[in-house]
Amino acid sequence: MAALPVHLLKDRYWASLIHLFRNNSKLKGVFTSKYFNLEGEKIKIHALKKLAGPWSHSEKIMLNLALHLFNERNKFTLSDFDSLDEHNSKIAYEAIRIRFGN
């Protein structure tokens, strides 16, 4: 993927999503122009959800969290945090801090 526009990294909605996509191995693999138009500030959410169909439960949790932090119309169940390993819990909490502040 091309360099990230600086203004997106300063936007708390984009920055939280980008943090998860950069730091989770499964999400990093799909952080491509096939699903993201960063210049146009668009995400192919339905295509990502369809792609995630066969993913593990924890991988889907991370995708759902990333999409929810970007736009709360994308639902997320807080109790799903119980299914995350230490690494994913850490980056999830970091992304929440990015989105909502300290």
Image (tube, rainbow, N blue to C red):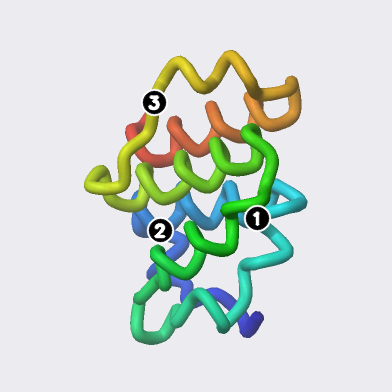
Residue 87 x/y as whole percent:
74, 29
Residue 14's tag is 2
What is the quadrant of residue 72 in the picture? top left
Residue type pointed to by label 3? Thr
Marks 3 and 2, Cα distance to the nearest angstrom?
A: 20 Å
- Binning the other alpha carbons within 10 Å of mark 3 as few (below 14), some (14 to 19) or many (20 upward) gives few
Q: Mark 1 points at which residue?
A: 27
Q: Name the residue under label 3.
A: 77
Picture residue at 63% right of the left edge, 20% below the top: 83
Marks 1 and 2, Cα distance to the nearest angstrom?
A: 14 Å
Question: Mark 3 near mark 1, Cβ–Cβ under 8 Å?
Answer: no
Return the residue nearer the eye: 93 or 45. Answer: 45
Picture residue at 37% right of the left edge, 43% below the top: 69
Number of marks drawn: 3
Is residue 47 shown above or below 68? below
Residue type pointed to by label 1? Leu
Picture residue at 56% right of the left edge, 82% below the top: 34
* Quarter the C terminus occupies: top left
Q: Which of marks 3 and 1 is nearer the N terminus?
A: 1
- Binning the other alpha carbons within 10 Å of mark 1 as few (below 14), some (14 to 19) or many (20 upward) gives many
Residue type pointed to by label 2? Trp
Return the residue nearer the eye: 73 or 38. Answer: 73
Of helix, strand and loop, which one carries label 3?
loop
Q: Earlier in the sequence, mark 3 or mark 2?
A: 2
* Quarter the N terminus occupies: bottom right
Marks 3 and 1, Cα distance to the nearest angstrom?
A: 19 Å
Residue 90 appears left or right of 79: right
